[in-house]
Amino acid sequence: MRIAIVGVGLIGGSIGLAARERLGASVSGWSRSRATLERALELGAIDRAGDSLAAAVGDAEAVFVCAPVGVLPDVVRDVLAAAPADCVVTDAGSTKRSVVEAIDDPRFVGGHPLAGAETAGVEHARADLFQDATWYLTPTPGATGVLFERLHRLIRELGARPATIDAATHDTMLAAVSHLPHVLANVLVAQAASALARDGEADRLPATGPSFRDATRVAGANSAIWTDIYLANRDALVERIDDVARRLRDVRAALTAADADAVTAWNDAARDDRRRLLEAQLAGGPLHELRVSVPNEPGVVATLALELARAGIDIADMALYPTPDNSEGVVALWIAGEEPAARAEALVAERGFPVARA
């Protein structure tokens, strides 16, 4: 398989390493920094450095755009202008609406791997970075089914777990579970430092316990990346900040009133909520295969995947089997767990598509 990476840093370099090691793929790369490209070649993240973006993506079957969020729409447009007509193009940005709403091309499927590290640069790339990681895909209704299925399969082969979701839901959710924690970590660090300064102890920092270290691990993350993320998702992030402020006021009121019952209930609820959130990531079960007959029309497969995602049903894997005349085809969907599979079967049938268990 021929894969192109645009932006060969930690994420792009890890995609290249995984694709070469796991798939035996031919990987070309392009970056504005020639030194970065040469380093990627040395490390084996790519096996060919393009002299230009067009040269890197000109014969690719799949292109991963790993550029900063703030420039993603422009870079994706440039890639689509140079990529072949049968090439799927995706990105790895941490926010999705800004790029998905800006691009109107059936070859593009937004993406976001939930993987990374505190370190940046291709020097820290790893072939196993995506192993068992969730990799969100945000197709538009017009996405080409064959290309969406190609990308879905490719991501599984890289070791990740693809999950389909619409761009708005992605950004709202990531504001709560990723972007807000970065904001709070920054605030906690600034608060601790300023408290010392007010007490005249600015030069004598206290020993920090594990709670502070764990809660502030992501403080001061790379501004070259995170400033764009904060701004691109600012409306959803502001809503989460307002919600935190409300919850803090509730805790403050319970503490001011010395309401032990309220404080205990608040603390216990947090424990239970955390357990449920972590258990949800481990949920699974035996795979059940559904075979769905669909017409060969633009967006059918992507729309079906999005509807299942909105119903809380994850597609573990998929495959397309077109008829010889390409007028229609069968989509094989593998769903983990009997109950989700049954709900998926019912939903697909409600949409008027013939469906059967394999």
Image: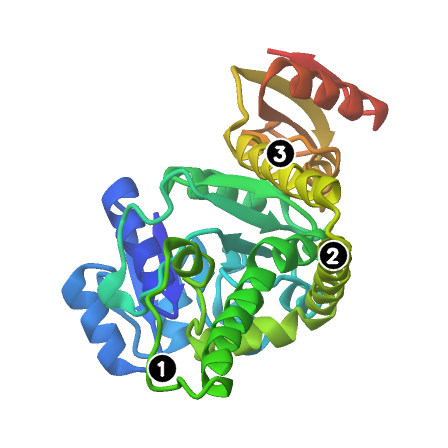
Q: Image height check: is 125 above or below 353? A: below
Q: Nearer the viewer, residue 175 or 84?
A: 175
Left or right of 219: which side holds 94? right
Question: What amino acid type is highlighted by mark number 1?
Answer: Arg
Q: Image height check: is 187 above or below 131? A: below
Residue 36 position in % (x across, y down): 26, 76
Question: Circle 1 sits on which residue?
Answer: 32
Question: Circle 3 sits on which residue?
Answer: 272
Q: Image height check: is 109 above or below 205? A: above
Of callouts 3 and 1, the N-terminal one: 1
Question: What amino acid type is highlighted by mark number 3?
Answer: Asp
C-alpha gap between disc 1 and disc 2: 45 Å
Specify the label residue 247 is tagged with.
2
Left or right of 138: which side holds 56? left
Question: What amino acid type is highlighted by mark number 2?
Answer: Arg
Badge 3: residue crowd in 10 Å (few <14, some 14–19, many ≥20):
few
Q: Nearer the viewer, residue 30 or 298?
A: 30
What secondary structure is marked by label 2?
A: helix
Residue 339 position in % (x across, y down): 68, 16
Residue 52 position in % (x across, y down): 36, 79
- Of all residues shown, which one is farthest toward the left? 42
